[in-house]
Image: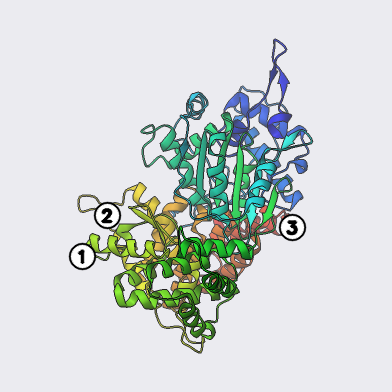
Amino acid sequence: MIANASRTKDTEGEDEKLSTSTVRRLLTGELSERRAFRLAWTLAEMDTRRVTGKPSDDWNAFDRDMRVLHAAALAAVNRPGEEAPHAAPQSPLPAGRKGDVDAGCPNGHRAPEAMSASHEGHIPTKDKPTAEAGDAAEKTTAARRITNLRSAGHCIGRSEELLWLRRALTDDRNGAATTTVIVTGLGGVGKSTLASEYARLHRDAYPVVWWVNAESPAEIETSLTQLTSRLVPGRFNAEERSARVDWAVQWLESHSDWLLIYDNVNDPRHLFPYTEALDRGHHLATSRRTTGWADNTLTLPLDVLRPDDATKLLNNLVCPGTTPSPGQEADVRALTADLGNLPLALRQAGAYLAQNRGITIQAYRRRLESKLDKKALATRAERTIARIWDVTLDALQDIEPLAVEVLRTAAWLAPDDIPHALLTSTGADPHDTAEAIGTLAAYSMLTDTGTHVSVHRLVQTVLRTSHATPSGTQPRPCPPGRLRAEQAVLHQLTPPPDQDYLPAALLDALSPHLVALAATTPPGHSNGALGKAYHVAACLLSLQGHDARTVPLLEASVAQCEQNLGHTHPDTLTLRNNLASAYQAAGDLTRAIPLFETTLAQCEEILGDTHPDTLGSRNNLACAYQEVGDLTKAIPLLEATLAQREQ
């Protein structure tokens, strides 16, 4: 809408307007004189409360954000000797945290980027000249069949759902086709399988089909960097992450008929920077979330398989290429009912029976029944998967214990793209690990590409939470696989012998696994070395402008610091302040402001009213008040802080 509102006539009467990519770059700080003038003028003329696709439901706050950006655009280009479209406002600076200490220091307060996003998303950088990269992206054409799809699992039934998806993405409504569709449903119901099957059926309709791991903004960015590497191999160095993300976005803006599949979206806001700006192709997403999506998206609620389709799927897995007898058919139908027609459960039960031909379906059902009352998990799907996995793990423990160990390790890491090396213990034979992974893949416990593995998120949940004692009240001090996962990540974080630092590309690849460990820390568990790694990774991400991505790392660091040093230790206060700043960067001011307030009160009590860290904490709270528009609290606090700093 901003791009369209900028439309004017040039000297020859031709239409001229800003592109959406230019608007995005200008709003995130990459300002050029002529275009920034037009952006500032356009924003001044617009009622930005009408702009769709915003990351917040607070229209007034969004309008204020846009006016702050407009003010900063004017301030950036209103240099001596140049005439601005109208007078510059009194306060040209956007709200943000200010500080003069390096973020890597224990008591650091990180200054914001000149223009920070109001939600967790990508902020373009200047790794490459933007105009040059944009021109190259526009001129680059894709060879046919650019894709990163892996071989899909069994997709039986779902014909009605597949037809609905195709119609939703291609039928015109009021002159415009929907470009974004969300498949929602419980874990294990087959959302990813459906999306993969849609891509396979309509592969020839899209020159580019790209699978995006979308559990977090960082993983979305990683998938986009991989798209750039496929389209223009060798153009960027591994360290130029932001430049590769920008190039991919610019390519998608200037080309049409592509398909992006975002798998496992946790927060609808993570998609808004892409689905609202990129409208020349199709966006297909899977998520457990049923609400919070933009008004112009369609959702497809996905349920378990129909009984006949579930029976057919299990028959194909257990007795491929044969027609079951009436007795076998009855047994299979009974087992599918036991498993609630849940596709993930059916695939894993089928893989077990296919690997163990001597066990009948009736015997397998009796084994499942013996596990029925031993689980206290949250959902029926989790309890079903837990029962299946208990049976499978019991069998694997006897024939290949290493496979069980590898699987329990993978449960604590990020679900996608786990390298084989991360599952191989120090000093162990990689071939043994590869054989264990092969066994797990044969049992449908994970998927393997030969170098990396992926584990279903529901399966990870079950493995992480099923370590309680039979009473379900007292967890073990350290759950199975947790220590092995921590040691593996710490080992990978050790720089090579000939270097003093970890290569940026390796840190980038390990970040999702560090975040996964931080986000799943068991109650009362502590690992000093890993806690330091969380803090270092959070500082590095913060220095790169990715404050919002540090939230789970800082939450784990704060918990560990409180446990080891106490709630009011200066280091604890610093970490808590940094966590509040990360909440603010992620747009979560409902958690940021109370944490800022608590931290300030403790700083005043422990460090004194005029200690530099107290002044920094007070300034941060004032800026958070300013960001939510509460100037009656922000201005007096800023005035008092300024007076104390001068003093």
Q: What is the C-alpha distance between the residues marked 2 and 3?
A: 50 Å
> Which of the labelled discs sits on residue 482, or is there none?
none
Q: Earlier in the sequence, mark 2 or mark 1?
A: 1
Residue 505, position in %: x, y?
A: 36, 47
The kind of residue on which mark 1 rests is: Gly
> Who is closer to the viewer here, 631 or 639?
631
The kind of residue on which mark 2 rests is: Pro
Element marked by disc 2:
loop
**Mark 3 lies on residue:** 632
Residue 430, position in %: x, y?
A: 24, 60
> Who is closer to the viewer here, 128 or 171?
171
Q: What is the C-alpha distance between the residues marked 2 and 1?
A: 17 Å
**Tag nearer the camera, 2 or 3:** 2
The kind of residue on which mark 3 rests is: Thr
Q: What is the C-alpha distance between the residues marked 3 and 1?
A: 62 Å
Q: Is residue 540 left or right of residue 376?
A: left
Residue 200, position in %: x, y?
A: 53, 44
Label 3 Cα neighbours within 10 Å, binned few <14 / some 14-19 / many ≥20: few
**Mark 1 lies on residue:** 427
Q: Earlier in the sequence, mark 3 or mark 1?
A: 1
Residue 393, position in %: x, y?
A: 39, 75
**Mark 2 lies on residue:** 495
**Tag nearer the camera, 3 or 1:** 1
In the rendered image, the vertical position of residue 293 relative to residue 345, given as above or below: above
Quadrant of the frame with the N terminus: top right
Is there any visible trace of residue 243 in the rendered image? no
> Who is closer to the viewer here, 278 or 302?
302
Label 2 Cα neighbours within 10 Å, binned few <14 / some 14-19 / many ≥20: few
Label 1 Cα neighbours within 10 Å, binned few <14 / some 14-19 / many ≥20: few
**Tag nearer the camera, 2 or 1:** 1
